[in-house]
């Protein structure tokens, strides 16, 4: 199974990027994992958020393949514990899912068209975090999920 984390925008703080890369490296012991960064949409101060989200959606859709299972990381999504998230990942492994794409949107979230096309949504927290932090938190939780699945002592039950 392949897992892709698709992120709108680059990480501008090296300590967040370094920590995220550490978990990406650890994940490769369990699954094929990669992080892809999409450039921010160039917008003027007067550009409406809806226009920005629609342009980001076009860029995101270019990275999605037929057959992908897609999850939007969104504050309106479903919350999981680490254990229930690991069970969701394990279900995908058992069912033969070829590729899962998790998407972290831009500053304004996702376009309505993406919400309609990809109804699976995960909320990491009710709190708001910077996109750089969310990338790290998600990679850590994904790594934790694989350690739970593989009975590795990283996660204390």
Image (spheres, grey):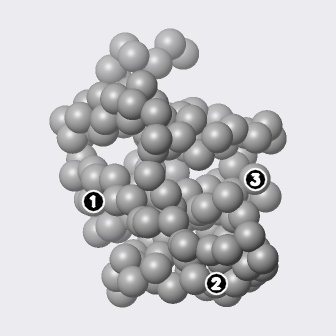
**Viewer-nearest residue: 120 or 135:** 135
Q: Residue at x 50, y 13 (%)?
A: 156
Q: Is residue 8 left or right of residue 27?
A: right
Chain-order first, disc 2 or disc 1 = 1
Residue 15: percent from left, percent from top: 42, 25
Spot occupied by residue 77 in the image (x, y as percentages of width and height) = 73, 57
Q: Residues within 10 Å of mark 3 (few under 14, many from 20)?
A: some
Q: Position of residue 59 (x, y in %)?
A: 46, 79
Q: In the depicted view, which residue is nearer to us: 136 or 68?
A: 136
Q: CA distance from mark 2 to mark 3?
A: 19 Å
Residue closer to the observer: 113 or 123: 113
Is 56 in front, or is 138? Answer: 56
Q: What residue is shown at x 78% (from left), y 76% (from top)?
A: 46
Q: Quadrant of residue 17?
A: top left
Judged by depth in the image, the label closer to the viewer, 2 or 3, is 2
Name the quadrant containing residue 107.
Answer: bottom right
The residue tagged 3 is 75
């Amino acid at each position: 199974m392949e897992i892709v984390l698709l992120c709108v925008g680059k990480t501008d703080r090296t300590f967040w990027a370094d920590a995220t890369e550490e978990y990406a490296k650890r994940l490769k012991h369990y699954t094929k994992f990669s992080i892809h960064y999409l450039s921010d949409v160039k917008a003027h101060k007067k550009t409406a958020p809806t226009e920005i989200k629609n342009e980001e959606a076009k860029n995101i859709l270019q990275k999605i393949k037929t057959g992908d299972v897609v999850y939007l990381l969104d504050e309106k999504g479903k919350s999981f514990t680490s254990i229930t998230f690991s069970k969701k990942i394990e279900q995908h492994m058992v069912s033969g899912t070829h590729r899962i794409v998790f998407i972290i949107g831009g500053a304004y979230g996702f376009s309505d068209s993406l919400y309609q096309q990809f109804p699976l949504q995960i909320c990491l927290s009710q709190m708001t975090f910077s996109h750089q932090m969310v990338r790290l938190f998600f990679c850590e939780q994904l790594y934790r999920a694989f350690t739970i699945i593989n009975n590795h002592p990283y996660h204390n039950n």
